Image: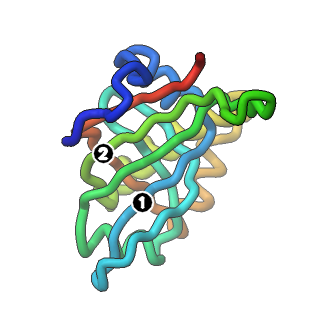
Amino acid sequence: MKTMRLAKQELDNERTRRILETTFYGILSTVSEDDMPYGVPLNHVLVDNKLYFHCTVKGHKLDNILHSSKACFTVVGDTKMLPEIFTAHFESVIAFGTVRILHDPMDITRALRLLCEKNIPQRLDVVDSVIAGYLSKLTALEMTIEHLTGKASED
């Protein structure tokens, strides 16, 4: 991995993980068979050193993952434009790693439940029945993080 060019903007691991845990969505980037990059916005959940996403059972990102499991996931946290000094304050995270498509219904259900616990905790009373109703139409992705970088500009 390359080192960050502006080392003073690099975040420690704790803050980097907190940004990744609290943001609602990010961009999963993969590469297709013809070497074209493809980025798609997805909501996510971080558990230990893995990110989980949900999607339908067919599509461009799944084709790309079957071609190459290497991917990166980018989130942008708080941002604020400072027009008076022609800059912005921001925070962002990039997770690099490998993605696999989950096939076992128990693994898919677990990933979907984790996403619901993070994103809609007020509906946990019905989440299991909703997941059961959609399980045949959905799958889930598991990204194992191999390298994580966080960056912020705050001065």
Residue 7 image position (x, y, % from top left): 34, 24
Q: Which quadrant is the N terminus positioned in?
A: top left
Relative placement, left or right, of 122 versus 24 is: right
Q: Which mark is residue 29?
A: 1
Which of disc 2 and disc 1 is earlier in sequence?
Answer: 1
Q: Residue at x 51, y 67 (%)?
A: 136
Q: Nearer the viewer, residue 3 or 73?
A: 3
Describe the element under mark 1 as helix, strand or loop.
strand
Relative placement, left or right, of 118 versus 121 is: left
Q: Which residue lies under the disc numbered 2?
A: 96
Count of numbered circles on the image: 2
Which residue is most to the right?
84
Which residue is most to the front?
85
Q: Which quadrant is the C terminus positioned in?
A: top right
Is 13 located above or below residue 2 in the figure? above
Q: Amino acid at mark 2?
A: Phe
Q: Is residue 122 visible?
A: yes
- Quarter holding residue 102: bottom left
Residue 56 image position (x, y, % from top left): 52, 68
CA separation, marks 1 and 2?
A: 10 Å
Is 90 located above or below residue 26 in the figure? above
